[in-house]
Image (spheres, coloured by chain):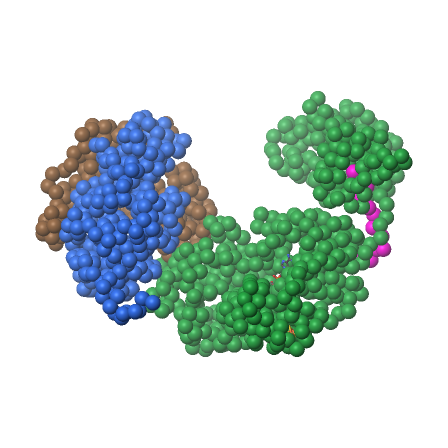
Chain colours: A green, B blue, C brown
Amino acid sequence: MRIGVFVCNCGTNIAGTVDTAKVASEALTFADVVYATNYMYTCSEPGQQEIQRAIGEHGLQGVVVAACSPRMHEPTFRRAVEKAGLNKYMFEMANIREHVSWIGNDKAANTAKAADLVRMAVAKLRFNQPLFSSKMPVNKRLLVIGGGVAGIQAALDCADGGMDVVMVERKQYIGGKMAQLDKTFPTIDCSSCILGPKMVDVSQKENITLYASSEIESISGYIGNFTVDIRKKATYVNWDACTGCGACMEKCPAKNTPDVFNENLGSARAINIPFPQAIPKKAVIDARHCRQLNGKKCGVCAKICPVKAIDFEMKDTIVTEKVGAIIAATGYDLFDHSVYGEYGAGRYPDVITGIQYERILSASGPYGGHIQRPSDGKEPKNIVFLACVGSRDASVGRPYCSGVCCMYIAKQAILTKDHLPESNSYVFYMDIRAPGKNYDEFVRRAQEEYGVQYIRGRVAKIYPRGDRMVVQGADTLLGVQVEVEADLVVLATGIESSAGAGELAEKLRISYDQYGFYMESHPKLRPVETNTAGVYLAGACQGPKDIPSSVAQGSAAASKVQSLFAHDTIETNPQVALVNERNCIACGKCIQVCPFGAIQWKELRGGIKKAEVLPTVCQGCGVCNATCPPKAVQLQHATDNQLLAEVNELCA
Amino acid sequence: MKRVAYYKGCSLEGLAAEYDRSTHAVCEAFGIELVEIADWNCCGSTPAHSYDPLLSAALAGRNLAIAADQGCDMVMTPCPGCLKSLKGAQEACEDPGLRKPFVELVGRDVDGLKTVSLLQLLYEEVGPVAIKKAVRRPLTGHVLIPYYGCLLTRPAQKAKFDDPENPVSMDRLLEATGALVPDFPYKTECCGATYGVTRNDFVGKLSGRILDMTARLGGEAIVVACPLCQQNLDMRQDQINKYQKSALHLPVPYISQVIGLALGMDPKELGMDKLCVSPDILFEDRAEAEGKAQGPGAAA
Amino acid sequence: MERTNTLSIRQSRDTDFIREVEEASGQDVSKCYQCGNCMGSCAYTFAYDYPVTQIMRLVQLGQKDIVLGSSAIWLCANCQACTTRCPNDIDVARVMEALRIMSRKSDTVSLPDIQAFYDEFLRSVKTFGRVFETGLLPIYNLRAKKPFTDFDLAPRLLMKGKLTFFPALVKKRKKIAEIFEVVKRDRFSKDGKARPEPLSSKTDI
Ligand SMILES: Cc1cc2nc3c(=O)[nH]c(=O)nc-3n(C[C@H](O)[C@H](O)[C@H](O)COP(=O)(O)OP(=O)(O)OC[C@H]3O[C@@H](n4cnc5c(N)ncnc54)[C@H](O)[C@@H]3O)c2cc1C
Ligand code: SF4
Ligand code: SF4
Ligand code: SF4
Ligand code: SF4
């Protein structure tokens, strides 16, 4: 094989600590290398032309580029060699930037290591084979997981574009956290007034199929052709029949059911439709609190329901949907403040969370929109807000900023003044984070027009004195300790990844960070893609976000899906496992270990069994390759020969 | 019988003699043998900490070394200040920089021992259930305030006992005696520590607010587990009253005294007479009165 | 130390000091983001010249003279409230303790009476092996020139039989004294640095 090697300077990124000319000259001594050079920016237009020129001029059959991580530019260079007439798999990349130049300053050592990596790449390339992909049709249906505002936006955008959309929401209603909010910053418009129409659209669009009270059971397949099993949880109400009249809720005797939608302020019934504008407006029985389902005599709802929708025998069911792309929009959950012993660890009824306060402010909330204390129903006069509770706090494992609380505190303080003109609001904060359009102005307005008293300092302790709560902290700007006697304390609890985010990520085969937020493919340049082709992100599941950003990301993910669906077919990835039938001893080990069920038996003439890989299902993980005793199954482009050649070269 | 090395500490030999006495009485009642550390010396307390880490570690560590040589694997001290020093010695023993000089001075390592406070010993080795069973003279109807002081459970990583912000072990033990135990928000607030001597007004201010909160919650007595807290709240209560122009009269018994009392021990044997503010109110038997107040048949 | 309202940061910034504090306390002071939780927690903020949050800040800025001359570090009771609540897991009380020790070594103790009390305490330990409360207080009070402090307590304590008139003696007092001597010898010669001579009597026991 005639091999060419191109060592990239990457400006000074690589050349600063690696002698690229020396690496190139050393490469010339490696077997089969007939041409080697170093170049300023190999990925640039002239850089690519240089590769193509060399292929023609030197009759190259394979190319190694020693440069950055293949993550970004492997596709670039593969296209370049393909244009010059080579098969794109006759190309290898050695990462001498992230793996060498950026992590060490010793130029001699770096240069030697870079040369080693190039030597390994050359050794592997000598065993490379041309590989060819085939074309598969794209199923132009979209799955949206999570029906918060981000998921809703993505679903509506795609549905407007004429695509079929399947939405899976695990709660009984869509709208997510935004459905619980009263008004929204920075314009103080009513949350349900702006979200409601979108929710209605979801339920009315012909081409959106909504599965509420449902979760993802499993996902298989690949971009363009996913198969999704959805678990429809038993609601004990036949939704095809239920008209949402609410008669059952009124009569249900299980009155001590926690009102989850109202964040446990007040109680609901075991059969419930959480709020009047709920979509879908269908009743669900909470099996933990229903008397009938817990072996007591009841069945009141079944008797009352005019359409006989109640079904106590209902079981979970699984439905299967086939889609071509998936958007994860599973949002966030809120930090549990009971770890803060100094704030009472949740045992003081008048120390509440921001989301509880949203419910209190809401006209459809537990107190009909009148601000009152949960403990005794009294109207509070002095209200204290605490920023950064479970945010920016390494000691509770949440060092990051939740991004939205500074703003919603200002909003809630403003609304408090609107509701109770005689009240005083105090905000304990460390820094005010208000970088959006008209955001800082909004926070200033809270202080200048609404007289909200901001105090810079973290609160040390909250404790009861009589029927009030003492908030003890510091004003660090003055350098004094301060104390406020409050009637009500609102903790701006931080944003964390939604419960079960990790398990869903494994089903989707996407990565997540140490806090459970889904990882985008590139923090700047691929903000809504994941590392799994065909799976996109929208909203707070990727990191704390406010509504404008969540909606923007929902639309961005939708546009990615639309550009994917603009094609009728998609190229398959040929880097999959392949069985050499002559060597296969039919032990079946590969079938057992394959996590994707991509290997099955195939019968040859005479009833001889051999393993067979389904190339469209195989994800190229290589577990079968490692397991197979006679090494009959080989992962293309990462065969034993190729990997051993690299290792041998390194150990030589 | 459980054998536990006993590090008494200087206070219990002087101003807190009743803490020593009642500790012995209660431990004996529950079958815990206290083995006094032979020829023990002062742990060095805050003054040693403020002088040099090695001084503090070596002074406290010598006692642990003796305890280990006496064949004990657990050391108990009723004084949280001493406990902090003892734990500090164990930490020094694990510190790469201090271990060598420490072992040279003290003669051996001491990190294998378990070091606990009296409260932890009573809570973990005896426990509220056993105490409840042993009660002969229930304190029913008495409202007792549990005050832990700042060092007993803090910092959490070192104390490794109960909760640093809202400890409950003493609450549970007091409840076992039949007493009523309100949620006390100043459980771990500092009482003024050693400033009784050098900055008397600090104690007036800090212990003053602890006593005020006790009175506000209807507490009849404030129960402590630290000799220093006890001195500040009890011995200096008159000074505090003068400082903040109040007329409080709140007895400040040790936890061991209260438990002993509930077990039916002689108050004198427990050194109740040594308390500056008279604890007589605790001797009132309200169990019967309570029963009567509820009227016959109220039990159903 | 008197409060300064102007700081020429580059002139007064002592980076060695920052490193020394970090070494002595085992804490990374740059982690402090000045939230104020420690000073909000500290029961002695009312008495400090610089609240503990500002002590942390001054250490970050390397303001050695202000920090080691502050009264705050000598009024800290080591109550651990700050350490318990610091959101960045800084053992703030350890930093305060390290600063106390450093201020002793550099002979800049701002509250000599508190140091005198500690010294008296340590002398008692060194002599008897234990602290002799009844003896310690009057001696300290005399030295601090407030001989009548706590006089009001005496009759009551006498009546309760709480005052002892003879110190309890540890048998192996020599061993205790040896510990003091060895520590004193090593104290200034750690990491090979020579002990600064002469050692003022003010800073030692
Ligand atoms: C107290 C408070 C006040 C706020 N006020 C404002 C404001 O005024 N203005 C503003 O811009 N922002 C505000 N926000 C932020 C706002 O709530 C978020 O920006 C927004 O809700 C994010 O939308 P989302 O769709 O990404 O996530 P979510 O609203 O969390 O929706 C996610 C949805 O996915 C569902 N889901 C989760 N996991 C699964 C799963 N595994 N399978 C199926 N479904 C799943 C959830 O049930 C939920 O319905 C506030 C936040 C709080 C806490
Ligand atoms: S279950 Fe029946 S009664 Fe209940 S809301 Fe639906 S239709 Fe109405
Ligand atoms: S947005 Fe504000 S309150 Fe929320 S974590 Fe960030 S700084 Fe704290
Ligand atoms: S340890 Fe010192 S600085 Fe920290 S809170 Fe207690 S007294 Fe204040
Ligand atoms: S609590 Fe910690 S982070 Fe906050 S000011 Fe104090 S030392 Fe700094």
Q: Name the residue rendered at 20%, 28% in the picture.
A: C172
Q: Name the residue rendered at 77%, 66% in the picture.
A: A207
Give the side of residue C60 with respect to residue A255, left or right: left
Q: Is residue A577 magenta?
A: yes
Residue C205 appears in the figure: no
Q: Name the residue rendered at 30%, 60% in the picture.
A: B180
Q: Is residue A235 above or below residue A537?
A: below
Query: Could you say which quadrant of the image residue B205 lies in?
Result: bottom left
Q: Front-most of B146 and C201?
A: B146
Q: Is residue A351 magenta?
A: no
- Name the spot of residue A515 as percent of width and height, x first: 57, 50
Query: Could you say which quadrant of the image residue C13 lies in?
Result: top left
Q: Is residue A289 above or below residue A368?
A: above
Q: Name the residue rendered at 45%, 70% in the picture.
A: A374
Q: Front-most of C185 and C167?
A: C167
Looking at the rendered image, the quarter that the C terminus of chain A falls into is top right
Magenta part of the chain? A565-578
Query: Could you say which quadrant of the image residue A379 lies in?
Result: bottom left
